[in-house]
Amino acid sequence: MAAARASLRRFAALFPGGFAAVMATGIISIDARELGWDSIGWALLAVNVAAWLLMWAAGLGRAVLGGRALARDLARHDTGPGFLTLAAGTAVLGTQLVAFQTAGWTAAPLFALAILAWWITLYGFLTGVTKGRIKPSLERGLSGQWLLLVVATQALASLGADLLQDGGGSPVLAFVCYAWVLLGGVYYLLLSTIVLYRFAFVAMPPEDVTGSWWINAGAAAVTVLAGGKLMGSGLSIGPFPLRDLLSPVIVAFWADATFWIPLLLLLFAWKHLIRRRMFRSVLAQWSVVFPLGMYCAATLELEAVYGLGFLRPLARIVFWVALLTWCVIAASALRALARPNWPPQQISR
């Protein structure tokens, strides 16, 4: 009994951002499907369903065993944004199931669950950090995880757009998804401005160059995916076709996602090659994988919307880089799980 309870506590102590593994696995699986490598996609779908169930079990276990500690984590600047991966991961799993045209009946319940998780985590986090009396400095309190506000919102819009196409096009859902895309865009503009200020005007030692900053690119890319799907639905908001309303938005955000990738590569090269820091500190973070997979998906969406066939080779290259990175991080996570006293954050962050 004691051993079972200790095992439960190990999994219940997973970092709140654990659903980032679901997000990363889901989007790479979708990329594989879109690029014609179905066997890879189906294998990752099976892995992702198991990972989603494990993370939910871990989260519920932690809520039972340490609800107060969980609430404190939600109200913290450094850990609170990670809770938004719960909504984003659930929405990505729903999108994955739609892409593979399997268990289609689960898409709507997953959509509803993702919305509920989004409401609770978004407003719980923002309320907690607002009312807190002691607040960290910008360099200690801000990380790329804050861009999960964008990712979670756009993940909802993406799954909603999938349901629009499957359900014949509800004008109410179309308007809500359009509003989500714009809301996520507003979040992105606000947060990316602060991030650039953090990069340029606040000291950035090598240890502060962490995998979470890759979410800068992922947040822009998921906006492209959600907006592109809405454009492809053929629906309108009043007299205005969504294709016309969103066309400049998705091109701008794809360009922004493309901008971030070379800058992040240079920063990580500076950290790992020039300053001789260990690669392991980055590759142990799932937040590196999702943006790469999402950039591939965004590029494929842009190709589909505008018929830009020259983008497909770029998407293929990014896909294989993302898949290789996923394999390295998954192997690292499995090794960590096998240890008797693994640090939970090494697996889920």
Image (cartoon, rainbow, N blue to C red):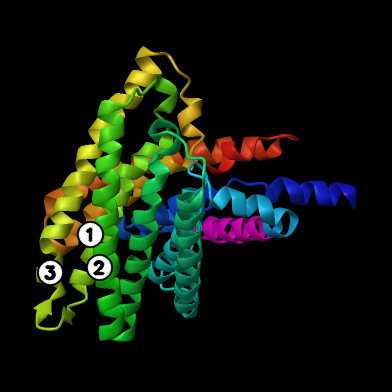
Furthest residue in direction front, as rendered = 133
**Left or right, 264 with reference to 207:** left
Check residue 301 in the rendering and tell me which mark sits there, or answer none. 1
Check residue 229 in the rendering and tell me which mark sits there, or answer none. 2
Furthest residue in direction right, as rendered = 1
In contact (CB < 8 Å): disc 2 and disc 1: yes
Residue 202, given in percent of the width and then of the height, sits at: 32, 26
Say which label, 1 or 3, has the lower sequence index.
3
Q: CA distance from mark 2 to mark 1?
A: 8 Å
**Left or right, 245 with reference to 199:** left
Q: Nearer the viewer, residue 275 or 26?
A: 275
| Extent of the magenta region | 44-60
Q: Nearer the viewer, residue 134 or 94?
A: 134
Check residue 245 in the rendering and tell me which mark sits there, or answer none. 3
Disc number lying in front (3 or 2): 3
For the residue carrying disc 1, how many other residues have a C-alpha within 10 Å: few (<14), some (14-19), or many (20+)? many
The rendered magenta stretch, by its main secondary structure, is classed as helix
Q: Nearer the viewer, residue 218 or 181?
A: 181
Residue 160, given in percent of the width and then of the height, sits at: 34, 73
- Counting the numbered discs, the total is 3
Q: Secondary structure at mark 3?
A: helix
Question: What amino acid does circle 2 point to?
Answer: Lys
At 89% from the left edge and 48% from the top edge, which residue is drawn?
Answer: 2
Query: Against 32, is 15 above or below?
Result: above
Question: What amino acid does circle 1 point to?
Answer: Glu
Q: Secondary structure at mark 2?
A: helix
Q: Secondary structure at mark 1?
A: helix
For the residue carrying disc 2, how many other residues have a C-alpha within 10 Å: few (<14), some (14-19), or many (20+)? many
